[in-house]
Image (cartoon, rainbow, N blue to C red):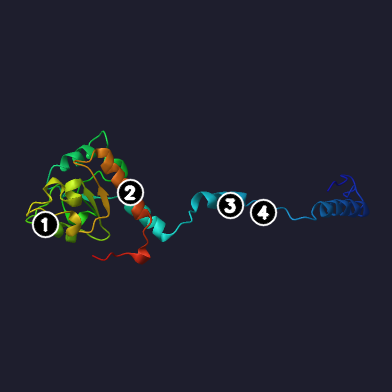
């Protein structure tokens, strides 16, 4: 407030001050009839960027199909095609499978490749039984699917599905690495459709 130095009194009269103040208040009231929207758009954007709506099934299946760990179970010649698949040209590590487990207790995928004799069958079954749930089996090659050219032999198992439940069959003698990769993709698709509410398979 402005004051006269000689008299020490206000330069403006109280009435004029009251009127000016009232005009300012009334003008502000007219401009303030609507509430100013809250500046919370940033909050909605943050939620959209940081919240993902999904199901437990989708999350578990994504994790399971993206980190399949194969176990060594290659009693015959198709193993060489698997070795090629694991090498740099075909590179199964892009499917999260770069570590081939030597222990079945650390694996969830058995890729069976080659002729299986009845003498070797108990060991293959033992490997399967030692794998933790959930676990899957790919039968790779004609011998794994049906015994191949040796199926009529007295000592050859006519397909791994006589010993362990098979999820995906990859035909060929031997199947090319591209065929095995396609079988792996089929298995991943099968895993993505599974539900934890109906887990467990009859054998």
| Gap between marks 1 and 2 measured at Cα | 26 Å
Q: Does residue 26 appear left or right of residue 94 in this picture?
A: right
Dots 1 and 2: beta carbons under 8 Å? no
Picture coordinates of residue 182 (x, y %)? 31, 43
Within 10 Å of the Cα at label 2, are there few (<14), some (14-19), or many (20+) other Cα atoms?
A: some
Within 10 Å of the Cα at label 3, are there few (<14), some (14-19), or many (20+) other Cα atoms?
A: few
In this view, 59 is above or below 84: below
Q: Secondary structure at mark 1?
A: helix
What residue sits right under mark 4 in the picture? 38
| Gap between marks 4 and 3 measured at Cα | 12 Å
- Residue visible at 37% across and 66% down in the picture: 197
**Circle nearer the viewer, 2 or 4:** 2
| Gap between marks 1 and 3 measured at Cα | 59 Å
Dots 4 and 3: beta carbons under 8 Å? no
| Gap between marks 1 and 4 measured at Cα | 71 Å
Mark nearer the N terminus (1 vs 3): 3
What residue sits right under mark 2 in the picture? 186
Q: Does residue 169 appear left or right of residue 198 in this picture?
A: left
What residue sits right under mark 3 in the picture? 44
Residue 84: tell me if it is visible: yes
In this view, 82 is above or below 9: above
Within 10 Å of the Cα at label 4, are there few (<14), some (14-19), or many (20+) other Cα atoms?
A: few
Q: Secondary structure at mark 4?
A: loop
What residue sits right under mark 1 in the picture? 121
Mark nearer the N terminus (1 vs 2): 1
């Amino acid at each position: 407030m402005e004051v006269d130095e000689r008299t020490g009194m206000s330069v403006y009269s109280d009435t004029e001050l009251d009127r000016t103040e009232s005009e300012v208040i009334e003008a502000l009231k007219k401009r303030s009839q609507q509430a100013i929207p809250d500046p919370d758009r940033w909050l909605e954007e943050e939620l959209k960027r940081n919240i993902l709506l999904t199901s437990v099934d989708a999350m578990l299946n994504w994790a399971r199909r993206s980190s399949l760990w194969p176990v060594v179970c290659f009693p015959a010649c198709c193993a060489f095609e698997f070795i090629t698949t694991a090498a740099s040209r075909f590179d199964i590590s892009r499917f999260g499978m770069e570590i081939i487990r030597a222990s079945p207790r650390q694996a969830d995928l058995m890729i069976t490749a080659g002729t299986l004799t009845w003498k070797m069958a108990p060991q293959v079954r033992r490997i399967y039984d030692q794998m933790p749930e959930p676990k899957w089996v790919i039968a790779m090659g004609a011998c794994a699917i049906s015994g191949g050219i040796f199926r009529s032999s007295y000592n050859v198992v006519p397909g791994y599905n006589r010993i362990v439940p098979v999820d995906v069959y990859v035909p060929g003698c031997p199947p090319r690495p591209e065929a095995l990769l396609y079988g792996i993709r089929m298995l991943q698709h099968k895993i993505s459709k599974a539900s934890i509410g109906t887990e467990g398979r009859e054998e």
